[in-house]
Image (cartoon, coloured by chain):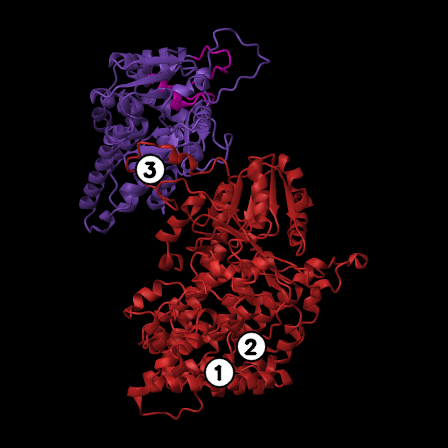
Chain colours: A purple, B red
Amino acid sequence: MWWRSASFILDRQQNNEALRQETSSTITPPPPTESSTAMGFPTDHNPNISAYYQTRAAHHAVVTSDWLAQAQAATTPHDPPQSTSAADPDKPFSVIDEFNNWRRLPDLAEAVAAIRALAAVIRSSQASTMMQLEIELKKASDSLKAWDTTSISLTAGCDLFMRYVTRTSALEYEDFNSAKSRLIERAEKFGEISYKARKIIAMLSQEFIFDGCTILVHGFSRVVFEVLKLAAQNKRLFRVFCTEGRPDRTGLRLSNELAKLDVPVKIVIDSAVAYTMDEVDMVFVGADGVVESGGIINMMGTYQIALVANSMNKPVYVAAESYKFARLYPLDQKDLAPALRPIDFGVPIPSKVEVERSARDYTPPQYLTLLFTDLGVLTPSVVSDELIQLYL
Amino acid sequence: MDPSRRAPRSAIDPVPKFRQVGFFTPGAPPERSQSGPPDPTHSPPVSDVSPSANSLSPVMIPPPRHLSDNLAIHARPTLASPLRAESLAAGGGGSSFGDFFPAPMSPATQASSSYSSRMAAGEGSFFDRHGVRGDKGNNNGKVASSFPRGGFDLTAMKKVSGGGGGGGSGAGVPASELTTVSVVNDSLAIHEKEKANRGGGSAVEAKDQSTGSKQQKPKTTKAERRALQESQRAAKAAAKAEGNKASGTATSANAKPAKAVKPTPKVDNAAVAASEKKGGDCPPEKDRKKDVPQPRMQYDDKSRVEKAKRRAMVKQTEARNRVELFRHLPQYEHGSQLPDLESKFFHLDPVHPTVYKVGLQYLSGDICGANARCIAMLQAFQEAIKDYRVPPEKTLVRDLTAKIGSYVSFLNECRPISISMGNAIRFLKSRIAKLPLTVSESEAKVSLQSDIERFISEKIILANKVIVKHAVTKIRDGDVLLTYGSSSAVEMILLHAHELGKQFRVVVVDSRPKLRGQILLRRLLEKGLNCEYTHINAVSYIMHEVTRVFLGASSVLSNGTVYSRVGTACVAMVAHEFRVPVIVCCEAYKFHERVQLDSICSNELGDPDIISNVRGREGVNYLDGWANVENLQLLNLIYDATPSDYVSMIVTDYGMVPPTSVPVIVREYGREQVWI
């Protein structure tokens, strides 16, 4: 599969630049990272830095050198999604461009952006048979997945889209156009569902937040924030402990946002989790991906928080949209494709010293209490149930 | 057990609604019952408190029977006449076989030399790939030597059986005009015949039959009295037949009970009526009865065992000193039946020669491993169906079901049916039952044969390939993989990973008495894998360097319990303690909706003598002749149950799933889909 290789993406990117000299600034590769550990690959696709975390950094307004570079790139004007897809008939439609355009919306999750990009693929497809369309869609989703193999939700979102959209009665329509419109309709519905997922989760989880409770939150998760925001709007009285969330300090951002809502917040450094756990009533985390065992893959540190919470018998709740359900089954921490990211220690690190740069860990299901998803409030073992029903 | 999968879920206090899947108890965290011996003071005779999930204990009143059952016997897969459980197999009760018997231990496909050479040609790729390698002088060498090696002249056997079977079933009946009555005749005839055929089923006893009629004495109707009389007569005749059998001629033994048992259908009816009265106002709900699992035969029930034995074709002598907790399981002295069965080889009427052969191979231990046994059985059935002729006056659907049932019960006598075999039998019977009436005999036979073929290739061979594909992704360079015993799936995984060029080391853990790990070890070494071999005693020593444990399974039950070769639970628990992921490889056709919490209520007992002897070391036979000592009880358990908490992942043909998802697969792909 040459689609999957990183070199293909590089080539394609260069081609695009050649085609569109005037707008080349949109795809400017960020400057090499200054981080002491980064190797300084000159492209957007630094294999040592997970693209997923670059996006996250951008969305979560975390100040890193990377982010600054990205922000600079993002400030330059870029075409709205429609014009790129429709305006240039000579240039083949590219999912990745479409995806990147959607991705720039700060509130849109990566998977939803992918879903919308795939929907656009169907719309702009010139295929004349169902099979062609399906192959085209498959190619698009493959290239999207290859674009960032470290993002679980992107992969899962693409897979789920393929599953949801192509597994319809559409194939029974005699007329290709009606079948296609049915597919588009379904794709849009799926996009809509995914988009609303966060709100549904926020509603479902309200019952779990009781007055006077203390919630420990790790990292910045848009879903968790949505949940807390809704609880605050519902005049619930609760207190939030935010972990600092080194190295990208996502906890600081969350505490900022919560303070704006007048929720009492306390920032806790990552190593003080066990120290504060006795005051905590429940732990709330988001997830990068929910795997088949019912465990989650999330920002580094979730596992140890879950372990501490479990040993102190505090419930651990996970808020995750169903498009993050992935057909993965890690057996242990190292059983994942690592998503690496630069870590800024503030002081230079000697070159002989190794740095663990993995950005996420795997929390096994036995340490989780419940998962709040748009499918409902689930126990971890239901995840596999849902996945089996979806994929088999 | 501590970080149980489910334990933390109970920690939620303000519990709003949330969904759970699989097995859970509302409220309290499900405390998993450990498979340890229950307190003897609480449960003096195990059978009485038998915790088995789906069997009624023998003291319970059996579900009410209905008169019409005898007529409906062949219409339904589950037979609800008072003849219960296994003995019913002949009447089409085989659907519940999986419930009754534990599965074989190591799902390795291994056929030993005496078998392989003959079967390999017809076996297809499965055996070719793993099974067939002569493992001479291994575990079964001793028994196999007494096996009639040259004696299988299939053509001759077919002639014998064809003549015998045809004659036995339909000869006496003149081509009749009484088509209206023929339905009733049919079922009765079949019923009688099957009894006759089997001269007595493996195991079961119409205990309720006798007790029922006894209790009814005060107010018996005429019919009942007659029925009682007849049952007594039958019993006497059977006893006589038993005597005959002992005296030697197998033919007469088979012929006599045939006559003797003839009147029993009426007895059944009477007993049915009786028990129905006993049952009070229970309406004749056939549907409900179908749901009620048939009670398993409890072998500590003397009277039943007595009767079952009378019916049995394989003469089994019971071992004397049985361990208290396991008295409900059949335990026979091994070695005695084989010569006896061999001598009967050319006189058999009811059992097709290929089935007979497979049965003997089970008995001698030449075929073991769940997949191997299942494939051997299915292929024997295929052969039997090919040679099958519908007797005049009978319909294929009913007669064939009965035939298959009788084969099954024969195999069951040779060695208790495994869960995987039970599922395969269920599949076959449902296919037979679904045959449209309009199909001609030859078409039906062809379609059944192709169904069996499909089951073997899709559910076993293809499933194994898919499992290998999934499991290989979990092997990384530098891994140390531990496996226990010999599992065909695990072997394929290891070999495939090796072919892919992964660098890993294998630790083969083995245990007495079967030492099946040596077979695996040999095959792995032939392919040039890096291996280490140790016995289970050293598992805690070796575990610290292991990164993955791969285990095979005989069955996975729907609470995630893995039912496998004895010792598996031990390995899994040690691995869990060392935080080593335990991966169980099991094809979905071996899943079963039963729930089992311990390995006591359903298990298989092996030959106790094997564990008291040390093979190859004559000097250490300290226990020679001790089998008869009153104070000594030998326990050779074949299976054990591994609680799901010790299992990290189950690799099946539907992908990699957590053990909690087994019921989901059983539900979603239950029955029809799983069985194609």
Whether residue B254 is situated above or below residue B23 in the rendered picture: below
Q: Describe the element under mark 3 as helix, strand or loop.
A: strand
Chain of the residue that carries numbered disc 3 in the rendered image: A
Range covered by the magenta-colored residues: A32-58
Give the Cα separation between the discs numbered 3 and 2: 53 Å
Cβ–Cβ under 8 Å for marks 3 and 2? no
Same chain check for tags 3 and 1: no
Same chain check for tags 1 and 2: yes
Q: Amino acid at mark 2?
A: Met
Residue holding disc 2: B313
Q: Badge 3 local density, few (<14 within 10 Å), some, or many (20+)?
A: many
Residue holding disc 3: A378
Q: Amino acid at mark 3?
A: Leu
Give residue B215's quadrant in the image: bottom left
Residue B552 point in image, percent of width and height: 55, 50
Q: Which mark is residue B196?
A: 1
Chain of the residue that carries numbered disc 1 in the rendered image: B
